[in-house]
Image (cartoon, rainbow, N blue to C red):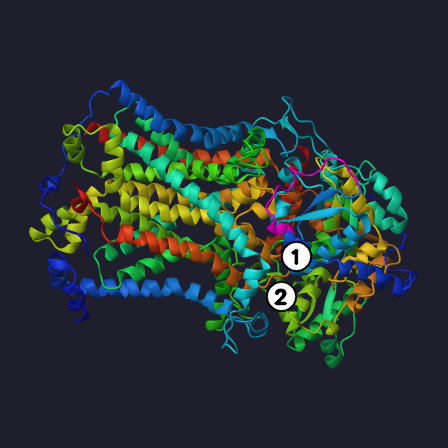
Amino acid sequence: MAQSSTGSGPGAAGHAVSRRGLLRAAGIGAGALAVPGLAAACSSDSGSGGTTKGGGSSSKITFGSNYSDPAPKQAFASLISAAKAKTGVTTKINTTDHNTFQNNITSYLQGTPDDLATWFAGYRMQYFANQGLLDPLDDVWDKIGDNFPDVAKNLSKGVDGHYYLVPIYNYPWVVHYNKSTFASKGYEVPKDWDAFIALCKQMKKDKIVPLAFADKDLWPALGMFDILNMRINGYDYHMKLMQNKAAYTDKEVTKVFDQWRELMPYLQSGANGRIWQDAAKTLEAKKAGMMFQGTNQVAAQYVTDKKDIKDLDFFAYPAINPSFGQDYMDAPADGFMMPKKAKNTAGAKKVLEYIGTKEAEIAYLKYDQWDVGLAKDLVAPTYNDIQKKSAQMIAQQKAVAQFGDRDTDPAMATALEQAIQKFIGEPTAGMISTIQQSLAKQAKSIFNG
Amino acid sequence: MASTVNDASPAVAQAPKRRRRRLGRLTKKEILVVLGMLAVPVVVDLAFVWGPALASVVLSFFRWSGVGGLHPRACRPSGGLIQDNGCFTGVDNYHRAATNYPPFWPAVEHNVLWLLVFIVIATPLGMLFAVVIDRGIKGSRVYQSVLFLPVMLSLALIGIIWEFVYSPNYGLINTVIGHNQDNNLIDWLGNPHLNLWAVLVAATWRQAGYVMVLYLAGLKAADPALREAAQVDGANAWQTFWRVIFPTLRPINIVIIVVTVIESLRAFDLVYIINKGSNGLELLSVLVTNNIVGETSQVGFGSALGVVLLVISLIPISIFLYQNFKRKEGR
Amino acid sequence: MTADGALARGGVVRQQAGRRFPIGRILSYVLMIGATVLWLVPILFALYVSLRPYAETSKLGYVSLPHKLTFSNYVNAWQESDMFHFFLNSVLITLPAVIITLFLASLVAFVLTRVNIKINVALLILFTAGNLLPQQVIITPLYRLYLLIPLPHFLADSGLMYNSIAGLVAINVAFQLGFCVFVLSNFMRTIPDEMYEASIVDGASLWTRYWKLTLPLVRPALAALATLLTTWIYNDFFWAITLIETGSRRPVTSALANLQGQFVSNQNLIAAAAMIVAIPTLVVYMLLQRQFISGLTLGSTKG
């Protein structure tokens, strides 16, 4: 799954489409917005049993959604009502909370799934495509292909080269900070590791926690592993490791943990017992200087907490190995797939063809202040500074990874997450070698049987 | 208090009871009635509990993601990311659990510890509550209701409650004792030497109320005539309980013992909601869950862990029940 | 003395016990009051947080004096999650499941304890041991089974056990049956044989002995079990999410999960929602409490 992007990412070329046109397109979406999500949740008739087989222009589809948070839910409803206005296809949304949806996906796809469903890019999608649980979307992509840069196209393909996903947004994993803190203390954005460590030291001296940090939910610290691995060993090695083509006993992995050890004194202590929301709160309260996490979480938390999102800024993780500079990052993408068991495939594809357009992404992003669309040259009129910067930064990457738990087998991701918790609890050289041995051994049985 | 004295059953106090009277031969009609009474529950239990359970035993010898069917052939090595699926692996899953699955042995250890804490603290505490309440002290209804509250709350609420209590920077305990700063905080749920105990406090909080209600129902069903007979003889409350009431409650005590064992082996939700049972909170049933229910599941491996759990709980309980029945029949 | 005040109502027997051991009494009060406070603190604390605006606690922390107490979290939780709709689903699942489970379990328990058939022990072990199985162990085969069993459309518009309320009721019954059989059979065993002997002499049929004699006698146990079952089935999330595919058909626990959110979660709001969700179980408890607390005993009901 080569994701070698050439840099023509979203938002790279700026304002190709006139703003007025964009606004009008968004207006259509807003006009028809009659909280369809809620209406769908109330009607209790069959979710998938009663849909029509054919695909007439006035057909109906059901859409399995994991957008259960209020804001994404609203954004998704906006997207769907815009799709209805454009395609005439009526969509019934079947919302399941995010975690449940994810845990249940195997049985969901094999049971009586909806015609379309929300999902993620990367190996997470390819796995199900491989099992024959998804329908290829090549004909949809024939129509929408021109709307997307190559990165987005590659994200949407299975290992067999067919398309299985239509993406909607992505977001970068970066180091967040408060502009006001940096201004009042005279801190500068560090470009490389030495500057980064020096800044951390200074913050500690200033009685500020250098990096807010939490890993009770197991996945957040995986982002730290990813970025260190990509900074030190490069994207290609990282993907090799994720795909079981490199071993966890490699000295490259040792280097990652050694580097992490150096940073350990500057990470907020007690991370294994803290939920990331609480870590974000220490950043909000300016008790912490920085926090490395996805904008999808930190910026969203600022909005939820009604904190000043204008004060929030971020920078790309500092360079460590000069040969890779700041070329890579995790930028997970979310999108939509069509289950093999979908009933109204014609209607579903029609909706996907609409979703794969710039105006659809704009309709979605009206209610989303932290993600960025993937369509070529997209600058949504509602973008705030965080989103503008995110789009630019992602576009500049030589390649983006999805995330530790999206790029590899989930069992392996879990093993790695648990090993990282052990490391956080006891960051010693001895622990690192124990972890590496154990991970390599587990990889063997997870991947080979 | 409705513990009406009733003179009609004075003889019961003369323990041990007489040999259980066989109810004689059943007539044809009675046999039909008995069959009718048993048919539905037995079929339901076999079809929806035992059938799938036995299927899981079979699955534990396969490598299977839950997608597609099973094939009666040995697994082939894969090399890459995508693995052979639905193939027979023999006892590999068991072997892997014992030798190459780091959370396995900690989980066994924690399950044992959980059981010990329940046996030594949670269950006796619940029984004590029940006995004290049963004696009818003032406000017993209030105590009973409050102590039973945790049993009634949903997992979501329990998770939030203890997050509020244990949260390192914002939580109740650390704030009250002044350990909520980054240089001195106590990491209740993140420190692997501490978190199991922290969770056991929460588990006891729930288990005691549960045991209390079961036991209370047992005490209420116990014949008040017994107590009166004993107390008239001049026994004090303590003696009354241990010498007279406790022995007659033997069936209820068995319920309590079995419930304690089951609850400790099945313990799952508290640790799952905290951190999916990692980093010092490993428990067998959580490992089963993590492997079976999930995005891309390892149903075969998870089933093997489930079988291990099943066997270690089934054996002692079956022996216990069997012995218990034999003794009863033999009296 | 407070102890004496309490004793006055305690009847002759308790008075004797109390007068002789005031220290025991005092210890009892210390224990119960202490435990009650300890048990309540976490819950009251969560209640307190749920009454405070999120913006305030995220700034000041949970342990802080309130600037403002408000029910707005409750109002928002109720509206945002469409809770009433999900409550109805929960009632449709819980009520039949609890009644059917108790009925079936009491039948089995009665046969196990009062009819001498050869396979008694085997049956008891079958049911009790079935109760040891964690839900996760049986879910995968069960799910496949549910996709295979057709149901008539008046029972399930999915036409299958899968994704139907009837299917959900069935698995809840099956799964709780073992425990109830086990508990009820042990309670029935405490009933003195003499009572049955008398009724047999009177010529009571098997069914009469079950329905008229046994069931009233185990009412405390039935009430306690009904409380527990209601709690478990009502709070169940696992079966609901694995066997029901349509979100709008799921019980109220899934409405809670919907609020929990993917990334950003407003703990105060969720606490409020969870408090609302707890109310029905509290009501059921209050209603049934009398059944097993007011001392419905063998002596008083016989005859």
- On whether disc 1 and disc 2 are found on a single subunit, the reply is yes
In the picture, residue A81 is in which quadrant? Answer: bottom right
Q: What amino acid type should be assigned to the residue bearing mark 2?
A: Ala
Report the side of C296 relative to B207 (left or right). left
Separation of marks 1 and 2 at Cα, in angstroms = 11 Å
Q: Residue at x 65, y 60 (%)?
A: A70
Magenta residues? A40-56
- The x and y percentages for residue A95 are 64, 50
User: Which quarter of the rendering shows the N terminus of chain C?
Assistant: bottom left
Q: Main secondary structure of the magenta part?
A: loop
Report the side of A443 relative to B17 (left or right). right
| Foreground pick, B108 / C266 | C266
Mark 2 highlights which residue?
A: A279
Mark 1 highlights which residue?
A: A220
Q: Label 1 neighbourhood size at 10 Å, few (<14), some (14-19), many (20+)?
A: some
In the picture, residue A277 is in which quadrant? Answer: bottom right
